[in-house]
Image: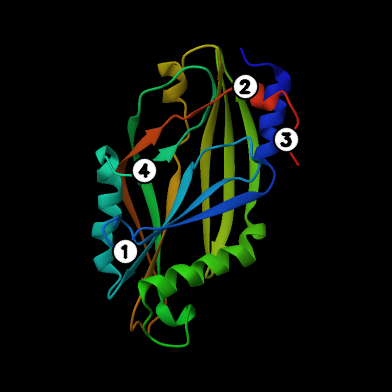
Amino acid sequence: MVRDEVTAAVKTALEGPVSVVPERRGFERRRGVPDSVFWLTPADDRFTCKPLPILVELEGTFANAVDDFAKFAERYDDENEYQYSVQAPVIGDHDTERRLKQMQYDIIGIRANLLTADDEIKEREMHEELKSWFERFHAKIHTEASVRRYSPQTIIDWSIKFSIFRHRFETVVPFILAGPQSVSEVTISRLSTPTIPGVVVVNNKYDSRDHTELRYKTAVEFPTLHPIRFREPPQS
C-alpha cells in the first residue's frame, strides 16, 4: 500500500506543468521512425520517464506517413537507443514486463507552409520549427489527474488536452501506485489506454487539413519510480 501523502504528491505533480522533450530521428546512421518525436512528461524533476510521444513525419502525401506510424508500433523489440513505446510509470519497487495493447493513433496532416514561408520544408527545419512551436505554446497544455482507488493498488489517470493547428488532442496516461507489491494483472487490466497524437507535415499541400484515426498494437513499458521520491518536496 502506498502512503496517502505519496498519492497526494504524485497527483499534485501531475496537475502541474508539462515538459516537451524533442527527439530528432530522421537523420544519418541513427535514423529511426518517425522523423521527429516530442515526448510529453511531467515537468516535476522527480519523474524520470517519457510516457507519451507526439509522432511527427514529413512526407509528400498524407497517406505515405501511415507506414512510419505502423513501424513505430512494430519496433518495440529494436535494440537501438530509440524508445518505441508508451509508458505507464509505476510508483513502486518491482519491475513489470512489457505489454502490448491496441491503441488509437489520432493523426492530422498539415501543409508545410504552416511552418515556413515556402510550400516545401526540409526535415531539419521542420523539427526546429516544431520545437520552437512547443517552446512557445507548451504552457497551454492542460492537465488533470484523477485517482482511482482499488485493492490492492491505486491508479492515477493523467489527462492531457492540447491543440495543434486547430486540432484538439485529448489523451490519458495511467500512473500506477504499487508500493512494495508487484503490479497485479488485475491492475493492468484496469489501465486506461492512451491515444497517441500524430502530425504529418506535407510538402506541396494546398488543401485543408487531413485527419484519420488508426489502431495498432503498441508496447507499454512500466518504468519504476521509488515512492521515496514523493515523500520529499521537489527540488527547486
Q: Secondary structure at mark 3?
A: loop
Residue drawn 36% across the image and 24% down it: 97
Q: Which residue is mark 1?
A: 27
First in sequence, mark 1 or 2: give its number: 1
Q: Which of the 4 image quadrants contains residue 7? A: top right
Q: Amino acid at mark 3?
A: Pro
Instruction: Find out whether the residues at labels 3 and 4 contact each other: C-beta distance under 8 Å.
Output: no
x, y percent for residue 91: 56, 24
Instruction: Find out whether the residues at labels 1 and 4 contact each other: C-beta distance under 8 Å.
Output: no
- Tell me the CA gap for discs 3 and 4: 33 Å
- Tell me the CA gap for discs 1 and 4: 27 Å
The answer to whether 58 is drawn above or below residue 44 in the figure is below
- Tell me the CA gap for discs 3 and 2: 13 Å
Q: Which residue is mark 4?
A: 103
Q: Amino acid at mark 2?
A: Pro
Q: Nearer the viewer, mark 3 or mark 4?
A: 3
Of all residues shown, which one is farthest toward the bottom?
A: 118
Q: Which residue is mark 2?
A: 227
Side (left or right) of 169 relative to 219: right
- Tell me the CA gap for discs 2 and 4: 29 Å
Q: Amino acid at mark 1?
A: Phe
Q: Which residue is mark 3?
A: 234
Instruction: Find out whether the residues at labels 1 and 2 contact each other: C-beta distance under 8 Å.
Output: no
Q: Along the line of sight, which residue is nearer the eye, 200 or 151?
A: 200
Residue drawn 66% across the image and 41% down it: 44
Q: Secondary structure at mark 2?
A: helix
- Tell me the CA gap for discs 1 and 3: 36 Å
